[in-house]
């Protein structure tokens, strides 16, 4: 169905009075004639609004947004930090300490709770701000006519009275009355729940009370254009739209924990149970050995506080938030947090050729007319070539935006390349389009692989113009032009044309066929075309893609190149990039892309899929990681994707996979560090009590360790640089738990070894002096200083830490903790509170030796049989 664009007098913009945007009653826009709609909105259906008028209306109506993402209020963000089982247990421990009369311990536990809650709150606040900024980088845009020019404007700046352009793959930016359309079909499932596409018409007669699903003259905010093209006058924006009126706000559902966060929450709950059981056992054994009941209860409470990984949820959120920004640094904008977890396990990338592996900077370099091959880089002014380029510029939706600084072309890169070639050949495309007005069109259809438009010629006759895939166009061409007029196209000529097409394709050129039918009436002539010739376009390979493909192979990630181009073109580009022919899929339809993703997933692969069009959305949604193109991608593709590439570059995908591996590896390093150190604290006290010695650490000393010592090394590990071989390992199995039995066994063994180090210092002082404040202080210092060294050990389970890339934060943590511990035992008020004394140089030496020997043993064991038997991968 084709509807004319209505342009008439009486619809021009009023320049001195306010437009009547807020009407007394809500008009039944769907039932009004196009002229009545334009008059009511004081709009010009042909030229659109002026820039000044659009700004004035925007100030009056406000931004075109429906329910800005409902982020949790600050109070809810605070409450989220204190409602977990972990925090409730800590608050219970605070109450128990207060009941026992240990005010200092109660305050210390409460401070620990508040500090971790503060970390979680700040992380959540930063993540909220960060995601808001990232969303701002990918603000949806709309095509609109302003002052007679086709321009791209942020969807939020669309106002009532704007004339918007509707094209396949775009989300409708506002409610609008359709004023022109060609084969326009819209999915209104997000609004009405109906899955079947709705065909739109601008000339239908509808009753004022027609239900929403029958309003074929309207398009609505949030719905998606599936095929065809059209124009519409905006009737409502923001909260005044149908979507806003019925309250279907996408962001109202809130956010859920990612699978990784849920897994860590379950892990924390299990460890809490184990830790509480050990703490109870310590208290019972201590009492049986004659230790005071009050002291052992305080010790058990303090041990519980030390054992509970209350900082782990905050650290997880911090790691994921840091990952989002690290990926943004590589121009990969994460739309869904689980993508950060999944990226590192990607095993297959299904990547589009055009725009991802190539620059999507199309240039027309060859043309064929009358069996002649013309090099357009040298001769673009051949009369026959000019006719060929003129037809290609007419059967074309590229917009021309004239500005003081020059002409800007808007639209698909292939179509803008054709218009640019016509312009460089001396053709005035704007005048040509005025002289050959378009009366009807059939948009490009992936099934037929052609686009057709019907025009009025200057001599009063009609013409049908077609461009598309060479074989599809030639199948519809019974004739070929000669100097004496059109003559039948023989099978030999057709075969020769197809062979020429293949020869051009083997050079890596994208080939389009152009044809026409003089005298065709609307909707007729598609099977009676006259073949005019080929236009061959070159799209250079992106710099760095070949190296990125090598990195993929080294990382165990297979790459499959997808393209709608013909096989010869795809293989030529593949050969240039080093992609084997069996990894190339040409002439891929949307259904074939979806089937390919499903087949790979059935084989156990973790699939990353790239796409840019409306037809790619199903495959993007089905893939484990959907990656949309940010520059040329449609709104529907971006909505279906997990990650949006701001630069449409294949190298960015590989960088994102590397970052995904690093993020996951660093999170495992933090878990490794926290739990092995927690085990060392519990085992130090447990072993001493079992052997009949007093607890090596006092309750407040345990709380000091928990309050101060864990935070800085954990933050340093979150920001740890990638290990040198992170992209030379196979992808991890996403079904594997973050803490396997082997990995858990390693943490327990390491914790026991660290505990032996602390006990060796404690017992040495006990045997040479006696149990008391000096022995406790030595154990206290040893336990604190062993943390940053264990964090260094946790940086890798394969490579010794001094061979890893430098991590300045780790050394800063070591220095800071050493100074903090010196202050804690040397400053009299702190020393009295913590029950410690200043140490002599010999005591410091004992502590340092006790810290270093277990860590050196662990480093020596890396790669050995013991650690190799219990180690899990950290990538």
Image: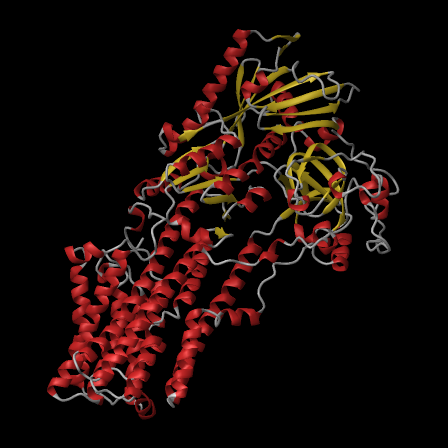
**Side of 568 where 417 appears, left or right:** right
Q: Nearer the viewer, residue 238 or 659?
A: 238
Query: What number of labels is visible?
Result: 0
| Quadrant for the N terminus in the image | top right
Residue 500 x, y percent position in the rendering: 49, 16
Which quadrant of the view contains residue 534? top right
Question: Residue at horizontal 31%, vertical 88%?
Answer: 294
Q: Is residue 185 above or below residue 505?
A: below
Q: Is residue 309 above or below residue 836?
A: above
Residue 242 x, y percent position in the rendering: 73, 50
**Side of 285 where 527 appears, left or right:** right
Question: Residue at horizontal 41%, vertical 76%?
Answer: 90
Q: How was this image coloured?
A: secondary structure
Which quadrant of the view contains residue 196? top right
Which quadrant of the view contains residue 489? top right
Question: Residue at horizontal 84%, vertical 53%?
Answer: 19
Q: Is residue 494 above or below residue 561?
A: above
């Amino acid at each position: 169905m084709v509807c004319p664009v209505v342009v008439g007098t009486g619809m021009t913009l009023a320049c001195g009075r306010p437009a009547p945007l807020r009407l007394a009653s809500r008009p039944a826009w769907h039932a009004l004639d196009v002229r009545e709609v334009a008059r009511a909105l004081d709009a010009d259906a042909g030229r659109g609004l002026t820039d000044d008028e659009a700004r004035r209306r925007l100030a009056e109506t406000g931004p075109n947004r429906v329910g800005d993402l409902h982020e949790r209020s600050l109070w809810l963000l605070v409450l989220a930090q204190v409602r977990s089982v972990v925090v409730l247990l800590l608050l219970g421990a605070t109450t128990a300490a207060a009941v026992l009369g240990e005010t200092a311990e109660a305050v210390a536990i409460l401070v620990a709770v508040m500090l971790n809650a503060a970390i979680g709150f700040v992380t959540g606040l930063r993540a909220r701000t960060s995601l808001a900024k990232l969303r701002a980088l990918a603000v949806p845009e709309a095509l609109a006519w302003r002052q007679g020019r086709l321009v791209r404007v942020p969807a939020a700046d669309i106002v009532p009275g704007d004339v918007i352009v509707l094209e396949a793959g775009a989300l409708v930016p506002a409610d609008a009355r359709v004023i022109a359309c060609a084969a326009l079909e819209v999915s209104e499932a997000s609004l009405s729940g109906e899955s079947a596409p709705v065909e739109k018409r601008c000339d239908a007669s509808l009753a004022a009370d027609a239900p929403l699903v029958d309003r074929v003259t309207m398009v609505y905010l949030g719905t998606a254009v599936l095929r065809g093209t059209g124009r519409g006058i905006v009737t409502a924006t923001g909260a005044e739209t149908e979507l806003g009126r019925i309250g279907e706000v996408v962001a109202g559902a809130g956010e859920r924990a990612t699978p990784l966060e849920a897994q860590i929450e379950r892990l924390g709950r299990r460890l809490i149970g184990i830790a509480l059981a050990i703490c109870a056992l310590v208290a019972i054994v201590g009492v049986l050995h004659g230790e005071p009941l009050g002291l052992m209860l305080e010790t058990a409470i303090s041990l519980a506080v030390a054992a509970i990984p209350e900082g782990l949820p905050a650290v997880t959120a911090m790691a994921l938030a840091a990952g989002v920004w690290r990926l943004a640094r590589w121009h990969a904008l994460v739309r869904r947090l689980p993508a950060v977890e999944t990226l590192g396990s990607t095993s297959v990338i299904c990547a589009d050729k055009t725009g991802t592996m190539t620059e999507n900077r199309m240039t027309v370099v060859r043309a064929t007319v009358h069996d002649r091959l013309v090099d357009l880089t040298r001769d673009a002014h051949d009369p026959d070539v000019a006719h060929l380029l003129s037809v290609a510029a007419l059967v074309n939706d590229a917009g021309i935006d004239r500005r003081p600084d020059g002409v800007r072309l808007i639209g698909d890169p292939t179509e803008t390349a054709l218009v640019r070639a016509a312009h460089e050949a001396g053709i005035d495309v704007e005048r040509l389009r005025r002289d050959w007005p378009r009366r009807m069109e059939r948009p490009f259809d992936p099934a037929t692989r052609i686009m057709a438009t019907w025009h009025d010629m200057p001599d009063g006759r009609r013409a049908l113009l077609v461009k598309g895939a060479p074989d599809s166009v030639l199948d519809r061409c019974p004739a070929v032009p000669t100097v004496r007029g059109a003559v039948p196209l023989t099978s030999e000529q057709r075969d020769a044309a197809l062979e020429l097409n293949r020869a051009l394709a083997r050079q890596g050129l994208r080939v389009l066929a152009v044809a026409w039918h003089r005298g065709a009436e609307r909707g007729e002539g598609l099977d009676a075309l006259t073949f005019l010739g080929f236009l061959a376009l070159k799209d250079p390979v992106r710099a760095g893609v070949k190296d990125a493909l090598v990195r993929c192979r080294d990382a165990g990630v297979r790459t499959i190149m997808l393209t709608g181009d013909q096989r010869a073109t795809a293989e030529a580009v593949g050969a240039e990039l080093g992609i084997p022919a069996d990894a190339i899929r040409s002439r891929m339809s949307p259904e074939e892309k979806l089937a390919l993703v499903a087949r790979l997933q059935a084989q156990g692969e973790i699939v990353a899929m790239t796409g840019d069009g409306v037809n790619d959305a199903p495959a993007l949604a089905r893939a484990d990681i959907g990656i949309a193109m940010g520059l040329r991608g449609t709104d529907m593709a971006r909505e279906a994707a997990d990650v949006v590439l701001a630069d449409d570059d294949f190298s960015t995908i590989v960088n994102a996979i590397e970052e995904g591996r690093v993020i996951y590896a660093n999170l495992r390093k933090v878990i490794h560090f926290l739990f092995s150190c927690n085990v060392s604290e519990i085992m130090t006290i447990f072993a001493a009590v079992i052997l009949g010695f007093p607890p090596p650490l006092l309750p407040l000393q345990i709380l000091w360790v928990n309050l101060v010592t864990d935070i800085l090394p954990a933050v340093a590990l979150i920001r740890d640089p990638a290990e040198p071989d992170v992209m030379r390992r196979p992808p991890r199995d996403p079904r594997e738990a973050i803490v396997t039995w082997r990995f858990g066994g390693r943490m327990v063994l390491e914790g026991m070894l660290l505990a032996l180090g602390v006990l060796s210092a404690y017992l040495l002082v006990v045997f040479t002096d006696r149990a008391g404040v000096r022995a406790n202080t030595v154990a206290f210092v040893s336990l604190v200083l062993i943390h940053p060294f264990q964090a260094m050990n946790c940086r890798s389970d394969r490579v010794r830490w001094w061979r890893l890339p430098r991590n300045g934060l780790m050394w800063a943590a070591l220095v800071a903790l050493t100074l903090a511990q010196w202050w804690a035992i040397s400053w009299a008020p702190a020393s009295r509170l913590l029950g410690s004394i200043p140490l002599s140089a010999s005591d410091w030496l004992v502590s340092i030796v006790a810290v270093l020997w277990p860590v050196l043993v662990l480093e020596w064991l890396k790669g050995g049989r013991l650690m190799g038997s219990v180690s899990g991968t950290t990538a």
